[in-house]
Amino acid sequence: MNYQTTAEFAQQLDAEDKLSAFRNEFLIPQHNGHDAIYLCGNSLGLQPKAAQQYLTEQLATWQTKAVEGWFDGDKPWLDYHKQVASLVAPIVGANDSEVTIMNSLTVNLHLLLVSFYKPNNKRFKILMESGAFPSDQYAVESQVKFYDLDPKDAILEVKPRAGEYTLRTEDILKAIEENKDELALILFGGINYYTGQVFDMPAITKAAHAAGAYAGFDLAHAAGNVPVQLHDWGVDFACWCSYKYMNSGPGGISGIFVHEKHHQDRSLKRFAGWWGYREDKRFLMQPGFDAAIGAAGWQVSTSPIMLLALHKAALDVFEQAGGITALREKSILLTGYFEFLINNINETHGREIYKIITPTTPEARGCQLSVICNYKAKEIFSFLVSKGVIGDWREPDVIRLSAVPLYNTFNDVHTAYLALNEVIKVIDI
Ligand SMILES: *Cc1c(COP(=O)(O)O)cnc(C)c1O
């Protein structure tokens, strides 16, 4: 696409956008009486208008049926998580039985590590990307210590080369190869939260398996953002949150994936609870845990129905929009346009005011652009906020900006561009 910098061009792209009506399914935060330019779906997706109604329905069920709500009606609570799981499964490229919806993300990461991190004297190392999201670092560090291992010995990180910001796949594969006799697990983000880089999940999975290790992914920034094919890639396990690109609300419920090939494996350890018991016998309340076959067997506690209702409200919109394939098509265009405009500012000024550290190829990124501000970074961010352009700040000098295809417009991106341009004069950069 030959992008242009004019406002008319943005309007034209919006007019041609087949998904433009879906913005109206969301509540847009306000700034000085106008829609804010919300570019922070990487942190917290917007509220679907339907969310309130979905919640109200469940409150009404609780009111009128109380405990009977678990079994009665067209959406009995007992099966509600399955309806949600079958909406999420196509988003992550999984069979229905490979996905379940439960808990929150870091909790699920721990539960999956209990099953898939099985250190022994020979194999005890976990390979991660350097600069993984802190919660993942803390989870892994504490798991390693749980086995009385020293994180310094057991956790390996692949770092970008000097002067680079993102990882090269060849360096990841080399690290796997070099440690192949001691690797127990590879745990990567699907997309790194800081740089927005999409990792080559199929290649990493293949290399992990060739080395005799499991491959797991935290898809917090990937799920609902870029298409993934967890089943076909043979990924062993994955987990994600739903409140970023899947718009389920602050602290929204998480999802997990466990590949079919592990469903019959009774040797996998797990921390069990009654909700993971095989369903036909769960209510016999017998001693001795007998896991449900599939990801559902990793459930622990009673489904939080209100959180599931919020998740479903957003997923129904997601599906109506044509799912991840349709959204991705617009996303590539939208993010490409944003990248063009930011680079145009640098060209016009003859210096790199904004350095995009996110990869330039569409396959290696999703919605997010991570931008280093080479001058007066904090002031630039404050200016954007004052103009109602909402991105987020990451120390020491990065602004993350994500145009989300479900609710952002090309005009949003153009307005952000105008603000990024204006600030150069206003604060004298
Ligand atoms: C957002 C995010 C989290 C947050 O975890 P919670 O348990 O939901 O607080 C964890 N890991 C990654 C990679 C994230 O991007």
Image: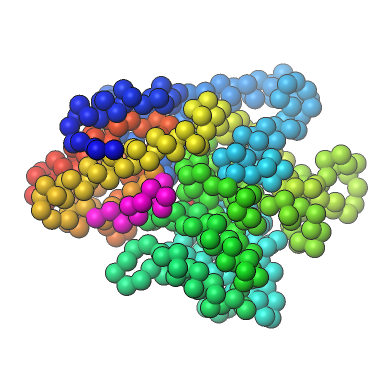
Display coloring: rainbow
Residue 224 left/right relative to 82:
left
What residue is at 58 percent from the left and 47 percent from the top?
229
Residue at the front extreme, as displayed:
1
Task: Check the image and report above or below for 112 versus 15.
Answer: below
What residue is at 47 percent from the left and 44 percent from the top?
226
Q: Is residue 391 visible?
A: no
Q: Is residue 359 magenta?
A: yes
Q: Is residue 177 visible?
A: yes
Q: Nearer the viewer, residue 185 or 33?
A: 185
Residue 249 left/right relative to 356:
right
What residue is at 63 percent from the left and 21 percent from the top?
57
Q: Is residue 212 magenta?
A: no
Q: Position of residue 253 (x, y in %)?
A: 59, 41
Q: Position of residue 44 (x, y in %)?
A: 44, 41
Residue 133 left/right relative to 213:
left
Which portion, as a residue range, is magenta? Answer: 355-366
Task: Check the image and report above or below for 377 versus 146.
Answer: above
What residue is at 24 percent from the left and 38 percent from the top?
2
Q: Position of residue 419 (x, y in %)?
A: 19, 39
Task: Check the image and report above or below for 269 versus 196.
Answer: below
